Amino acid sequence: MTGDGSLGPEARRGGASHGHVAPGEIAVGVFIGRTSEFFDFFVYAIASVIVFPKLLFPHLDALTATLWSFAIFPLAFVARPVGTAIFMAVDRGWGKGVKMTIALFMLGTATVAIAFLPGYESIGVAAIWLLALARICQGIALGGTWDGLSSLLAMNAPEGRRGWYAMIPQLGAPAGLIVASLLFAFFVGNLSAQDFFTWGWRYPFFVAFALNVVALFARLRIVSTPEYRELFHNRELQPARIFETIRAEGRNVVVGAFAPLASFALFHMVTVFPLSWVFLFTAEGIARFLIIEAVAAVFGLIAIMVSGIVADRVGRRSLLLGSAIAIAAFSGFAPQLLDAGPVGEAIFMILGFILLGLSFGQSSGAVASSFAKAYRYTGSAITNDFAWLFGAGFAPLAALLLSTHFGLISAGAYLLSGAICTILALWLNSRFAAKKE
């Protein structure tokens, strides 16, 4: 393997005695898995705005109830590194197939349990604790869904096409959002308020469980075959111990966690936060805004594909740096568009998703090639966990708190801080790489 993480001619033949495995086959498994995970994520995120405040905090005003709902939201991100540690041990002891089966079964169980959640009026504060428990279980399970296929995909990409293949896993985010938004828009728009809050909101969680089952079989079909087991072994994509990885690669983990911060902060600034702002402070119909969000996500999906083409021409780090600068500029004026009516909302969402697509498309594993081969599999998983925790976990709560106390411009300042962190992390990464040379 070359120093930049690309493969030499012998390795790219897929080398194993069991035959060649095409990158396209890996890409299909990655896309299905990521779409399922992001659909779960957005079903919960949308419900945390339009369902849980009323279901769990009916005794509070709408803003305070939403803030408490957002306080439960990051529990999954906090629990995710714990899940990674637990399931890496399972991976070492029993293999990826067992790990994936347990993790996805746990994720599906936690998700479908939310569909049966009673309200505060039925069982009181216990309903809040049950949701918090389900959210923690989701986070632990998500830590176990790391299958290494994204790393394997990048390492098996054809020469000069790593940017294109790196963006494929990221397509799952807009795809999951489009399906989740349209599903909720359908129920909100076609059911009475009573029917929606009684049973309509629960249906998307059942759909999420069904998608988890499909994703489980799709991913097991890949990671459990002899061809892929040997590819994981040959590429040294094997689970290392968490503390050993942090001790050996702590600097790269920190830099890797902060490098995509602009993308992950923007991620919630154009998905969860605007939904909460429009729902709480405007007369915009929630079903209509969900459709706007789905349409904007289509622009994001296209932008992610464009990011693959651009990254292969100018480099992934250059694209991330340029995107971070653009996000910094966007943060100075765009959030105020959410108070400019439907046209302003649409402009904010479309521009935001285009920027998100360009940056998020290459944010996964931006510095993964800096890890030593023995730690790349586990290091990439830990980095991903911390990037989501620092960049996205508390973003809806922080943005809503800031904007309600200091105006929408303060939400832009929060986004600006993420862009600055990305620029600094990329600079540090380039300095570290230069010292190695």
Image (tube, helix red, strand yellow):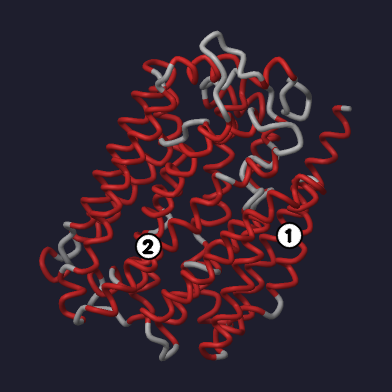
436 shown above or below 257: above
- The location of residue 293, given as percent across then percent down, is 48, 72
Furthest toward the top, the residue is: 17
Residue 379's image quarter?
top right
Between marks 1 and 2 in the image, the one whose residue lies nearer the viewer: 2
Q: Which mark is residue 323?
A: 1
- The location of residue 20, given as percent across then percent down, is 57, 19
The Cα–Cα distance between marks 1 and 2, rounded to whole angstroms, is 27 Å
Task: Report the front residue among 160 and 98.
Answer: 160
- The location of residue 433, given as percent across then percent down, is 83, 34
- Indicate the secondary structure of the residue bearing disc 1: helix
Q: Which residue is mark 2?
A: 180
Furthest toward the left, the residue is: 122
The amino acid pointed to by label 2 is Ala
Residue 358's image quarter?
bottom right
On-image quarter of the C terminus:
top right
Q: Which mark is residue 422?
A: none
The amino acid pointed to by label 1 is Ser
Left or right: residue 325 compared with residue 256: right
Residue in view at x 64 percent, y 80 percent? 409
Residue in view at x 30 percent, y 54 percent? 132
Left or right: residue 251 compared with residue 23: right
Residue in view at x 67 percent, y 21 percent? 12
